[in-house]
Amino acid sequence: MNIEKLKKASENFGTPLYVYDLSIIDSQLKKLKEAFKKLDNYQIHFAAKALSNISILKYINNLGLGLDAVSIEEVRTGIKCGYDVKKILFTPNGVNFSEIKEAVALGVKINLDSLESLIDFSKAYPNQTVSVRINPGVMAGGNENISVGHLDSKFGITEESLDEIVKMDKEKKIKVTTLHIHTGSDIIENNHFELGIRKIFSVAHKFQNIETIDLGGGIKIPYFLGDTETDLNKYAEVIYEEVEKFKLKKGKDIKLIFEPGKFLVSDSGYFITKVNYVKKSTKNTFVQVNSGFNHFVRPTLYKSYHEIVNLSNPNDKKFDYSVVGYICEKDTFAENREISKVSKGDLLCFKNSGAYGFTMTSNYNSRLKPTEVCIHKNEIKMIREGEKFDDLFRGQIDIFSE
Ligand SMILES: *Cc1c(COP(=O)(O)O)cnc(C)c1O
């Protein structure tokens, strides 16, 4: 991390501020490609919901990646950013069928995850190519909110409906060419990945026209020194084994898709705030920063750990602090955290905030959304203007105006 550069960005653009170092997206992609070197037929789709600024999406498109979209708005954003429609996969959950129709009209690939929506699809588009999201029945992921592949989850098709879908495929009501799983985010246990992978390949044998298996996202990155992370080599090895088995048994090749969100962009992002006060109370020393969960919700919502660096005073003696926001309810960023001595006016930087940072911001407490900048070829460039007071009222209608 380049402390001087981050301080400069804060001076030039103010705080709170999101900074993305684009070179880290490249290095993460390189790591992934390195781990997948034995796999020869795969495509990487970036999960847009992790970070959907158009400059970032264009940058990632230029790296040759496709897009994983979970709403029709993300599909349209992808198209606006130049993604080839054939490299956009739309994975909605529980949306109105009109959204699916719109996606078909735009020419993107559709990934459906309920028998009910597949029946609608077969009526509107008989025997058309479709991807089916399978619920692998594994509990995996960093916490309950982001574990989406277990049997109680609303995502994916479970065993009971599978036979019906195989039948629809046989009867040429639908043409299933892709199977998809996404088990959750922050998957630590490699054996959870393994269960999902083995499961989807076993399901693949039931379909006539399978060409692609989409393994979703969920790769866990380390949030601090010594934190757990997904063993990419083991992950790739299990996949390789299954692909080879598939080829042998079916006598044809299979294409893979991966949909990393967090893995590609989390590390590239820094969220920078300024200290308003250091407040002593009976039990705690609170560091009160000029932000709250309206700007960075992961610590509050998921209890996620983000390393905090005092950019203004990085190498001093460390003390225990509780870092909190200014929202009028509990919005703790970190409890009992050791940080290099903090004073009023210091810049505190939250690491690993590139994914699910800005995209989850809100205007709660009538606060304005922050500026986003990126570091590209050593230059700092603004990619989103911070909101202004009037932006709060955009679209509102004052029925009592004179
Ligand atoms: C959110 C999501 C991803 C990305 O998950 P990460 O944990 O960020 O890698 C991939 N695919 C689908 C369908 C998703 O909903």
Image (cartoon, grey):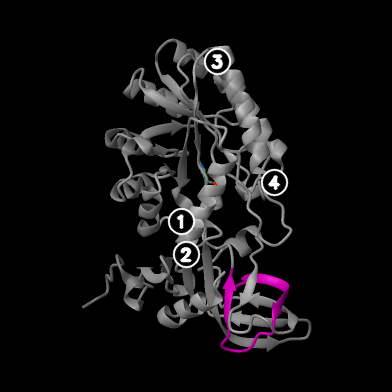
Of the numbered discs 1 and 3, the one sitting upstream in the chain is: 1
The residue to which callout 1 is attached is: 51
Q: CA distance from mark 4 to mark 1?
A: 22 Å
Which numbered tag is attached to residue 20?
2
Q: CA distance from mark 1 to mark 3?
A: 36 Å
323 versus 68 height, above or below: below
Q: Circles 1 and 2: CB distance less than 8 Å?
A: yes
Does any portion of residue 116 appear in the rendered image? yes
The residue to which callout 3 is attached is: 206
The response on whether ligand 1 sits within 8 Å of label 3 is: no
Q: Give the magenta part as a residue range.
A: 327-350
Dot 2: element: strand
Q: Residue at x 42, y 44 (%)?
A: 65
Q: Residue at x 50, y 23 (%)?
A: 254
Tag in front: 2 or 4: 2
Q: Amino acid at mark 3?
A: Lys
Using residue 84 as the reference point, say whether residue 4 is left or right of it.
right
For disc 1, the neighbor class at 10 Å (few under 14, some 14 to 19, many from 20) is many
